[in-house]
């Protein structure tokens, strides 16, 4: 059994779970200033208040797992991304504090509104910067980071930053369509149309740009007709989910837009996997080179076998308990 590959899939699963679950939290924050009345903002915040901190568990699992299981990858990626990662963590702290303090004040509410919006926006943008930096390739020499302080700041990484902000905002809008009613639902639905167009445009631009960043990426998709045929199901399914998203928004559906966007995110993630595998850091650090000794991987797998199902169970339970619509004036904090 190849434990390094198994762990690569587990880390990828944790990262995807984080992107999807904290994505709609951050997206709700990004939409915060555009929701109108402060009662509407209360409702939007109450829709994520019971579950937001549980969603961030996956970030800890992904980051901690990378440190323990792929120490070489962690040692190379962290110095390359210090600035965006520190900015992201500070933004998440501001956002977390805003959750707790916003309901405790009337006079200072505007300050926590700004904090919640700014924290969400900066965290989403920094995650996009980090993704872009990883995709464009990190300079490695003698098993260590060999690039400069600002290698993370390029036109491509800025584009992926903007793309992630648009994608998260779309997730947030469709979450609010699913979880709220009245004014908030209508506003979110209107924004969902615009954000869906922006997100699909961003996916198209980033995907085409990515193909020309590394020779291997181009080869994975366009090296031959047979090669393209083997991966063509990804863009085709993307079109299916895009159609489902617009059709369900037009039809006034409540749940399907959100799950259509989840489908879009999953396919983007699969596309990234097709580009990366078997590398963990493009262009030349593979999963096996970066992995810890096999005895460590097996030891950690025992913990993961308990931890991951436990997280899934309590996360599922929280979503089940707080299912249904959040109405104005009701909520977790009241």
Image (cartoon, grey):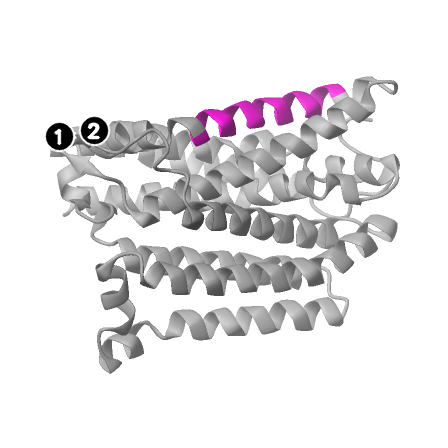
CB under 8 Å between callouts 2 and 1?
A: yes
In the image, taking residue 292 as reference, residue 137 lies left or right, namely right
Answer whether residue 41 is visible to the viewer in this image.
yes
Q: Which mark is residue 299?
A: 2
CA neighbours of label 1 inside 10 A, class few (<14), some (14 to 19), many (20+) = few
Vertical arrangement, residue 59 with respect to residue 285, above or below: above
Please tell me whether residue 90 belongs to the stretch shown in magenta: yes
Which image quadrant for residue 248? bottom right
CA neighbours of label 2 inside 10 A, class few (<14), some (14 to 19), many (20+) = few
Q: Residue at x 58, y 29 (%)?
A: 53
Please tell me whether residue 286 belongs to the stretch shown in magenta: no
User: What is the magenta range?
Assistant: 84-101
Answer whether residue 329 is visible to the viewer in this image.
no
Q: Position of residue 116 (x, y in %)?
A: 68, 30
Q: Residue at x 20, y 52 (%)?
A: 278
Secondary element at tag 1: helix
Q: Which mark is residue 295?
A: 1
Q: Position of residue 45 (x, y in %)?
A: 74, 35
Q: Main secondary structure of the magenta part?
A: helix
Q: Residue at x 56, y 44 (%)?
A: 23
Which image quadrant for residue 59? top left
Q: CA distance from mark 2 to mark 1?
A: 6 Å
Q: Residue placed farthest to the bottom in the image?
A: 225
């Amino acid at each position: 059994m190849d434990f390094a590959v198994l762990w690569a899939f587990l880390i990828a699963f944790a990262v995807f779970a984080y992107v999807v679950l904290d994505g709609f939290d951050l997206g709700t924050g990004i939409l915060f200033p555009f929701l109108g009345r402060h009662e509407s903002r209360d409702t939007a915040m109450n829709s994520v208040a019971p579950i937001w901190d549980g969603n961030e568990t996956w970030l800890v699992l992904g980051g901690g797992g990378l440190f323990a299981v792929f120490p070489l990858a962690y040692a190379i990626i962290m110095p390359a991304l210090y600035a965006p990662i520190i900015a992201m963590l500070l933004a998440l702290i501001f956002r977390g504090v805003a959750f707790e303090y916003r309901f405790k004040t009337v006079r200072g509410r505007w300050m926590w509104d700004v904090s919640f919006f700014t924290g969400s926006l900066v965290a989403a943008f920094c995650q996009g910067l980090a993704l872009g930096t990883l995709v464009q390739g990190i300079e490695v020499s003698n098993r260590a980071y060999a690039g400069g302080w600002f290698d993370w700041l390029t036109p491509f990484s800025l584009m992926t930053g903007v793309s992630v902000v648009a994608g998260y905002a779309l997730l947030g809008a469709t979450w609010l369509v699913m979880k709220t009613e009245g004014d908030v639902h209508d506003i979110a639905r209107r924004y969902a149309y615009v954000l869906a167009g922006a997100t699909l445009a961003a996916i198209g631009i980033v995907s085409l740009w990515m193909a020309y960043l590394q020779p291997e990426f181009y080869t994975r998709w366009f090296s031959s007709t047979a090669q393209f045929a083997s991966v063509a199901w990804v863009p085709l399914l993307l079109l299916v989910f895009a159609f489902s998203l617009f059709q369900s928004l037009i039809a006034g559906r409540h749940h399907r837009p959100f799950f259509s966007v989840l489908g879009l995110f999953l396919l983007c993630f699969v596309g990234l996997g097709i580009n990366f595998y078997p590398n963990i850091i493009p262009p030349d650090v593979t999963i096996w080179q970066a992995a810890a000794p096999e005895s460590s991987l097996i030891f950690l797998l025992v913990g993961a076998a308990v931890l991951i199902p436990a997280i899934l169970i309590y996360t599922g339970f929280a979503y089940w308990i707080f299912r249904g619509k959040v109405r104005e004036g009701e909520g977790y904090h009241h």
